[in-house]
Image (cartoon, rainbow, N blue to C red):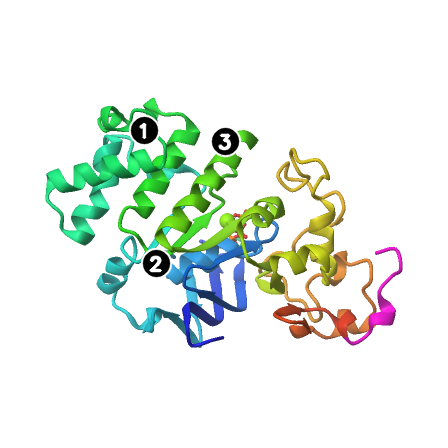
Amino acid sequence: MTDEALLSIENLRVRFRTPEGTGTAVDGVDLAIAAGETLGVVGESGCGKSVTALAVLGLLAAPPAEIEADAVRFAGRDLLGLSAEERRRIRGREIAMIFQEPMTSLNPLLPIGRQVAEPLRVHLELSAAEARDLAATWLEKVKIPDARRRLGDFPHQLSGGMRQRVMIAMAMVCRPRLLIADEPTTALDVTIQAQILSLMRELKEETGTALLLITHNLGVVAQTASRVVVMYAGQIVEEAPVARLFEEPFHPYTRGLLRSIPVLGGRTGLEAGRLAEIPGLVPAITERLAGCRFAGRCPHAFALCRENAPPLFAIGPAHHARCWLQVHPERRRRDD
Ligand SMILES: Nc1ncnc2c1ncn2[C@@H]1O[C@H](COP(=O)(O)OP(=O)(O)OP(=O)(O)O)[C@@H](O)[C@H]1O
Ligand SMILES: [Mg+2]
């Protein structure tokens, strides 16, 4: 964790108290993002990616959530110590978020121009005319054809890809220092996905915004991120610079995820909701496991893995993995 990190999260824990029992959705996550950096967070459904982001933004209802951390610092401020009002001011202005399904975040009853102008009115206190003009500029930046004429359009008049562009404009219009994008392209078809990703990269270059990109899809990470964090069952199991992760993945879970990417593009096993290469499921958050959480699905697991939870070991420069194979390399099966 470096001092110059824009966002740093230390030992974040999120529990949910439900009628079925208490479950730990995020269990000791450490993350740091430098200004302007793109960090990819990947992992199967239910591993705690969204809960991590929502906890940082103060968007989880508590109860049922219980959030604890040693520190969550953003630009030198302690986010957890802020009042709800102070956090609201940071959200949208300095940290913006894009959600997977644009229709849940866009107001169906308001024209898109008004929705893109709204953060400018709230956070930057621009006049209606100034905000409208800047909103139009941003709709042009996100390449909505004929943007100025379409300020009065309602979300239902736009395609899914166009709605996602509106969401990006809304998120970027105040030039936030950090953009959290949670599965920003999952709901879109492959060609539109590629366009939206390249648009996000372009805007990031232009504005210098740091990007926390949450996705199931390692292909998306390969194209966009400089560093990757792999999550499994509420924990970080591997982290590395992107090229290193693809060339020398260490954790058997990461290797499994990488094997699910087809060589020639197209839909991956992950996108299709299947993980043929890794049998079994992520354990339920209410399940208490003694050893490594991946042991039940891991082809290399031996006695130690079932008894003791491995720490995050240093594997190489800026490369860490939570796996006992680091100290018992002889246990790695040759065919993996
Ligand atoms: N409000 C809640 N109450 C109880 N459990 C919850 C709540 N919100 C999330 N969870 C649980 O926390 C775990 C982590 O959820 P999270 O949404 O972070 O997963 P994710 O990694 O984002 O998955 P996906 O890829 O499907 O979006 C899941 O088991 C989920 O069921
Ligand atoms: Mg999610």
Q: Which residues are magenta?
A: 327-336
Q: CA distance from mark 1 to mark 3?
A: 17 Å
The residue that mark 2 highlights is 177
**Residue occupied by mark 3:** 192
At 36% from the left and 56% from the top, the residue drawn is 59
Query: Which residue matches tag 1?
Result: 155
The three-letter amino acid code for the residue at tag 3 is Ile
The stretch drawn in magenta includes residue 328 = yes
Characterize the magenta stretch by its predominant secondary structure: loop
Residue at 30% x, 42% y is 170
Q: Mark 3 or mark 2: which comes first in sequence?
A: 2
**Which quadrant holds the C terminus?**
bottom right
Measured from the top left, where is residue 303 in percent x and y?
A: 82, 71
Residue ID at (73%, 60%): 248
Disc 1 is placed on an element classified as helix
Is residue 38 or residue 155 the one in the foreground? 38
CA–CA distance between discs 1 and 2? 27 Å
Check mark 2 vs ligand 2: CB closer than 8 Å? yes or no.
no
Residue 299 as seen in the image, left or right of residue 92: right
In space, the residues marked 3 and 2 are separated at their CA atoms by: 26 Å
- Tell us which disc is closer to us: 1 or 3: 3
Q: Is residue 104 above or below residue 40?
A: above
Kind of residue indicated by mark 2? Arg
